[in-house]
Amino acid sequence: AVFTDHHPFSKAELEAVLRQANGRPIVTTEKDSVRIHGVWPEFLQRPDVWGVPIVPDLGADAKAFEHFLLRAVHE
């Protein structure tokens, strides 16, 4: 199952995901894990549920962004 960004999960939806996965791994982002935890914390403790961190990749702009942040903090 695929859900839109900021989806308000229900326990019934998460149960349906478990049935559909049928033992295969379920992957969610850490961001969605926060909302899932509010509905059904035990869901996230299952060994077949994997939380993936969101890591920003600014590519070639990374140094410019770092410089911008450091200037903003020191102002």
Image (cartoon, rainbow, N blue to C red):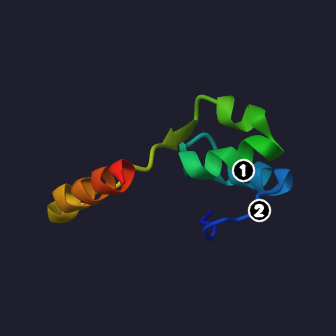
Measured Cα–Cα span from mark 2 to mark 1: 7 Å
Q: Which residue is mark 2?
A: 8
Q: Quadrant of the C terminus?
A: bottom left
* Left or right: 43 in relation to 62: right
Question: How many other residues sit within 10 Å of disc 1, few (<14), some (14-19) or many (≥20)?
Answer: some
* Left or right: 51 in relation to 32: left
User: Can the viewer see residue 24 in this picture?
Assistant: yes
Residue 62 pos. (x, y %): 21, 57
User: Can the viewer see residue 27 in this picture?
Assistant: no
Reply above or below: 61 against 21.
Answer: below
Q: Quadrant of the N terminus?
A: bottom right
Residue 8: which quarter of the image? bottom right
Residue 11 pos. (x, y %): 84, 50
Say which element carries label 1: helix
Kindly identify the amino acid type of the residue bearing the numbered disc 2.
Pro
Kindly identify the amino acid type of the residue bearing the numbered disc 1.
Arg
